Image: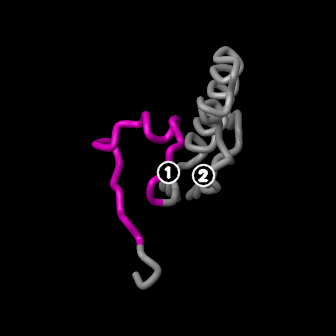
Amino acid sequence: MGKVGLEFPVVILGGFASGEFPLPETYLDHDLFDEHMRNHRRLLYVGMTRAMRGLMVSMPEGCDDQALNDLKSENWHIEKLTPNS
């Protein structure tokens, strides 16, 4: 049986800087925010599910991306990296 989509041994996701994802306070229309958040979560899901063996999500300290913050931290191995590590 052939593969349906692209998969990779390791996937690294980044680019979660402020302004790169929907924030509720920047929307006057809550329905529009919900639509953009669904799309953001969908793209995040697609990226995460392409990993076959390893997935790294790189985000800055204090990142307020709701889609990432909604994920349960007990399901992840989390490391805080510093410039000297």
- Which residue is at the front of the view, 64 or 10? 64
Residue 42, given in percent of the width and then of the height, sits at 64, 30
Where disc 1 sits, the SS reads loop
Disc 2 marks which residue? 16
Residue 11, given in percent of the width and then of the height, sits at 58, 55
Image quadrant assignment for residue 45: top right
Compared to residue 82, the image places residue 54 above or below, namely above
Where disc 2 sits, the SS reads loop
Give the left or right position of residue 39, taking residue 68 as reference.
Answer: right
In the image, the segment drawn in magenta is 61-81
Q: Residue at horizontal 63%, vertical 20%?
A: 34
Q: Residue at horizontal 70%, vertical 38%?
A: 5
- Which residue is at the front of the view, 19 or 83? 19
* Kind of residue at badge 1: Cys
Label 2–label 1 contact, CB within 8 A: yes
Disc 1 marks which residue? 63
Q: Residue at horizontal 71%, vertical 19%?
A: 32
